[in-house]
Amino acid sequence: TLTYLSWAASELDGYDEHVHVAWLGDHIEGFTSQGGANTWRTPLTLNEQIRITRRVMLAAVDMFAPLGKRVTFAAVPGNHGEPQRFNGKGVTRYDDSHDTEALIAVAEAVELSGKFPHVEFYTPAADEMTVVLDVAGVRVAHAHGHQWRPGKHMAWWQGQAFGKAVDFEHADLLLAGHLHHLFVEESGKRMFVQVPSLESESTWYRHSTGTPGNPGVVLLSLGGGRVESLRVIR
């Protein structure tokens, strides 16, 4: 799987006011994004990939729910999570994704259990691809990252803010995945964090560049309307 994951909290130790877990797309390998070219190299069926994603998300709920007074989960769609493409490029709605549907299923299970009433779940609105959420006083924007060309994340962010898309003009932090490696950039008090994937290696990328995988999870501490600290757990 190419899962991209980060979490943030208002405190690093003890019982946090707000714990947030961001699922940033490509939670499954899928078979649509590459037109089926990766089918032979993928040992799991599509349903097995989705099932594992759901179970990992549910395990994360069990893990993080006791740690905060408010606990939130957000998921956005990646290109690998697309259910179908027509003629190699067409899609249905932009929110139609295995990546987000897995979290929706977990949210329904948690609601039915009644076990964690303080846990909240967020996915994009109809035909949208992003989520913007207040986390400990920081407006956090979530996007997979396939919406812009490599290196053009700030220009894309500015365009979204100019168009007042899904409250992007108020975002302080933009989280993304897609390009597999860690990248952080600041512009004033605004910060862009591209988190690494959790895969050990993209063999295609290693053959193309010589660079192996370097999986990790990003932990952010938020407070005072900004990112106070950033740590990568390898």
Image (cartoon, rainbow, N blue to C red):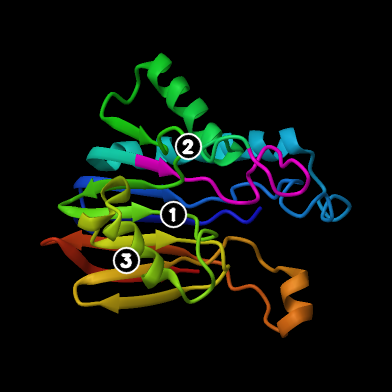
Dot placed on the residue nearer the N-terminal end, 1 or 3: 1
Which residue is painted at 23% across and 53% down in the image? 139
At mark 2, the secondary structure is: loop
> Which residue bears the numbered disc 3?
158
Q: Quadrant of residue 98?
A: top right
At mark 1, the secondary structure is: loop
Which amino acid lies under the numbered mark 3 shown in the image of this protein?
A: Gln
- Asked whether residue 53 is drawn in magenta, I would say no
Query: Which region is colored magenta?
Result: 73-91
* Numbered mark located on residue 127 in the image: 2
Q: Residues within 10 Å of mark 2 (few under 14, many from 20)?
A: few
Nearer to me, 62 or 102: 102
Give the dominant element type of the magenta stretch: helix, strand or loop.
Answer: loop
Which residue is painted at 74% across and 40% down in the image? 86
* Numbered mark located on residue 143 in the image: 1
Which amino acid lies under the numbered mark 1 shown in the image of this protein?
A: Ala
What distance separates the C-alpha of mark 1 from that of mark 3? 14 Å
Q: Is residue 172 above or below residue 137?
A: below
Give x and y (percent) for residue 113.
41, 16
* Numbered mark located on residue 213 in the image: none
Which residue is painted at 42% across and 69% down in the image? 153
| Residue reaching furthest to the bottom | 210
Q: Quadrant of residue 67?
A: top left
Give x and y (percent) for residue 202.
71, 68
